[in-house]
Image (tube, grey):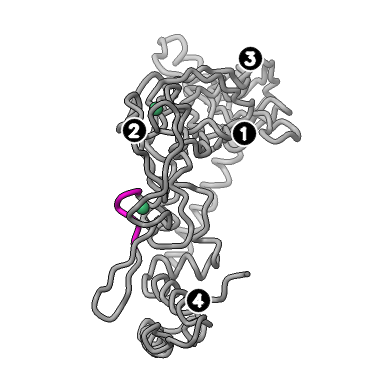
Amino acid sequence: MSKRDYYDLLGVAKGASAEEIKKGYRKKAKELHPDRNADNPDAEAQFKEINEAYDVLKDADKKAAYDRFGHAAFEGGMGGGGGGRPGGGFQGGQGDFASAFSDVFDDLFGDFMGGRQGGGRQRAARGADLRYNLRVTLEEAYNGLQKTINVPTSVQCGECNGSGAEGGAEPVTCPTCSGMGKVRATQGFFTVERTCPTCSGLGQIIKNPCAKCGGQGRVQKERALSVNIPAGVETGTRIRLAGEGEAGMRGGPPGDLYIFIEVKPHEIFEREGVELHCRVPVSMTTAALGGDIEVPTIDGGRSRVKIPSGSQSGRQMRLRSKGMPALRGGAAGDMFIELAVETPVNLTSRQKELLREFEELSEDNNPESHSFFSSVKNFWDSMKG
Ligand SMILES: [Zn+2]
Ligand SMILES: [Zn+2]
């Protein structure tokens, strides 16, 4: 059965104000309250539905998520549901771990993904996703690399085969909630359901917990994992390794491992997507007379570039396919060099003499200055007039 729209359930229009939503909820809650509907077998389920709807729509963050994603906003998959997490900010080598992947979604949903309560689905058994931050050089991003990382994670306990019970015995139904995973309490007008405190919502408990894992069914361990970072990665690239996250609770499925790439800035090259930019100084004489220069390329090689005579600072030249490879196939990017003409310094008296002589012989050698100063003259003239 597909879920009904939360606004429909409360009998209000989409985009209704907080006040309207509250009113709608009160009205429906009175109508459907189980105490008044002893002879309506569906009332209890409907009452639950409207409570769920109100729970979402009364909360600005949840409401925003629902408006954007519908019911999908609250459905599983991310598994931030609460299992144990590896202890605090592991730092080491070039990478570090954030404790749980749900952090990544904080931007989107605030903290409610993790703090979900009372919904029908109980996913506590799935292991948490892990995040690993990996810093690579631009050269590594160009070539791709194979890297062994140490993943501090929990793995299935070998003593109890992940069951959490001594000797691998099967868990038994929780006596507190009779396996429902939830208990009910009456609070004034309402009957509230909350996660069973005895079994933490799992519906089962373990009589004799495994001594090695304390009944968790998993133990902390560091695993060496060889990962393949493809050529073309950039800052923000995410690589997902399915099933390489934390082991699940009591034999539940493992979470995923996400590797977040950050590419370090480079001394010579600046990257823009698949393009590389490089600023190359050239001498005043090379710029004036023309000539060949050698520029470095990211593959470690060099390229000869012809500088046309009369080149100005800022002139760009393109080296085809000398940029970065495209991550998802496609053509490699280009490299652009930008000339920066360098005015000579530390002149000897002989050099000064030659430049003065050159200056005396100069006529039509600086068309840009000529045109600029004639515009300036016009400007001053117009101010006078
Ligand atoms: Zn165990
Ligand atoms: Zn229980």
Q: Residue at x 65, y 12 (%)?
A: 301
Q: Is residue 31 visible?
A: yes
Side of 14 relative to 308 (left or right): left
Q: Which of pointers 4 and 3 indicates the residue nearer the eye?
A: 4
Mark 4 vs mark 2: which is more N-terminal?
Answer: 4
State left or right for residue 141 relative to residue 97: right
Looking at the rendered image, the disc whose residue lies closer to the viewer, 4 or 1, is 4
Crowding at dot 2, Cα within 10 Å, few <14 / some 14-19 / many 20+, comes out as: many
Q: x, y percentage for residue 39?
A: 47, 88
Name of the residue lying farthest toward the left: 188
Q: Which residue is label 4 attached to? A: 6
- Look at mark 3 in the image and give the residue it sits on: 294
Depth check: give the residue in front, 15 or 236.
Answer: 15
Q: CA separation, marks 4 and 1?
A: 60 Å
Q: Kindly indicate the quadrant of the structure image that contains residue 352.
A: top left
For residue 196: magenta? Answer: yes
Q: Position of residue 6 (x, y in %)?
A: 50, 76
Q: Residues within 10 Å of mark 3 (few under 14, many from 20)?
A: few
Question: Which mark is first along the chain, 1 or 2?
Answer: 2
Residue tagged by mark 2? 209
Q: Secondary structure at mark 1?
A: loop
Magenta residues? 194-199
